[in-house]
Amino acid sequence: MKHLIVLLLILLNTLFAFNVEDLKTLKEDGDCPMCDLSYANLSAMDLSMSDFRDANLSHANLNNALAHKADFSNADLSYATFLKANIKGASFVKAHLINVDFTEARIWKGDFTQAKIEKCDFNNSALGSAIFDENNLSNSTFNEAILYKTIFRKNVIGVPK
Amino acid sequence: MRPLVLIFLCTLALFSNELKLEHNFNQAVEKAQKQHKQVLMMYSAVWCPECNYMKDVVFKDKAVSSYMQKHYVVLTLDIQKDKLPDGFEYPGIPVFFLLDNNAKEKHRIVGGSKAKTFLQKLKGLQ
């Protein structure tokens, strides 16, 4: 029975874990486009200017990370967490943002153009000068978020008040 | 007519929430010593939206400005014009340094926040 549980845990880990080589690449190069970093723990890491274009970051933990001007264009960030992260100037253009937790994140000048945004938590985040364009924000929450000079361009549904 | 204008201006100044900002480190330290206050030094830039939000919105909040006016001499230095005094390092802007009596860093607040939260943070520094 014990062996079966261990085997099951290993199997589950293999199924859901990130690619170890990809994480190594990120740590060495600071960039990891098209990488599989799903479920990776990137909390409190310095990811400033990192390239995550087309990467799989679903369920990744980016809490307290410093990802200033990082490029998450077209990345899958479903269920990722950015709690208290500093992601000023980061690009989320065409990214998949499903159930992402941005609570208390600093997202000044973030670019969310054409991002698929669903059930995201932007509560207490700072979205000043951020750009929203062609998004549906109706089922995301923005309680106490800073929306100072936030740009809501055409076709944005559910603009927070 | 003149006294009337003067009275009007004085009244305006009395009820204004405008926070007086200093821009010279030594002068701010000297002023704080004279007034038995602490120096709160903000390091910022004109191109930084977060910094502008703090100056344009948070510093103009009645509760924040009156608290800051009461407890601090507020010094703002610009990243493009002013070098931080020796011994100070910044992880990004805006950053707020609360100075001790020897003009050294006592506490710091990194980043801006809404008026209510910022006030809580300031009160937490005491």
Image (tube, coloured by chain):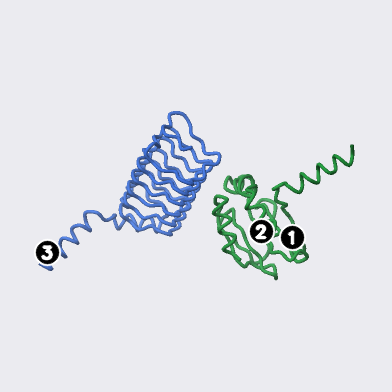
Chain colours: A blue, B green
In the image, is B3 to the left or to the right of B108? right
Task: Determine which quarter of the picture holds residue B9.
Answer: top right
Question: Is label 3 on the same chain as label 2?
Answer: no
Q: Secondary structure at mark 2?
A: strand
Q: Amino acid at mark 3?
A: Leu
Picture coordinates of residue B50 (x, y %)? 57, 47
Q: Relative to B44, does residue A150 appear above or below in the rendering?
A: above
Picture coordinates of residue A70 (x, y %)? 45, 48
Q: Mark 1 touching mark 2, by CB under 8 A?
A: yes
Q: Mark 3 touching mark 2, by CB under 8 A?
A: no
Q: Which mark is residue B28?
A: 1
Q: Amino acid at mark 2?
A: Met
Local crowd size for mark 2, using a 10 Å CA cut-off: few (<14), some (14–19), many (≥20): many
Q: Quadrant of the N terminus of chain A?
A: bottom left
Q: Secondary structure at mark 1?
A: helix
**In the depicted view, which residue is nearer to us: A27 or A123?**
A123
In front of the other: label 1 or label 3?
A: 1
- View extreme (bottom): residue: B102
Picture coordinates of residue B68 (x, y %)? 66, 56
Task: Determine which quarter of the picture holds residue B28.
Answer: bottom right
Q: CA distance from mark 3 to mark 2?
A: 61 Å
Picture coordinates of residue A14 (x, y %)? 22, 57
Q: Amino acid at mark 1?
A: Ala
Residue at 30% across / 50% down in the picture? A36
**Disc 2: which residue:** B41
Residue at 73% across / 55% down in the picture? B22
**Chain letter belonging to callout 3:** A
**Disc 3: which residue:** A4
Local crowd size for mark 1, using a 10 Å CA cut-off: few (<14), some (14–19), many (≥20): many
**Chain letter belonging to callout 2:** B
In front of the other: label 3 or label 2?
A: 2
**In the depicted view, which residue is nearer to us: A34 or B72?**
B72
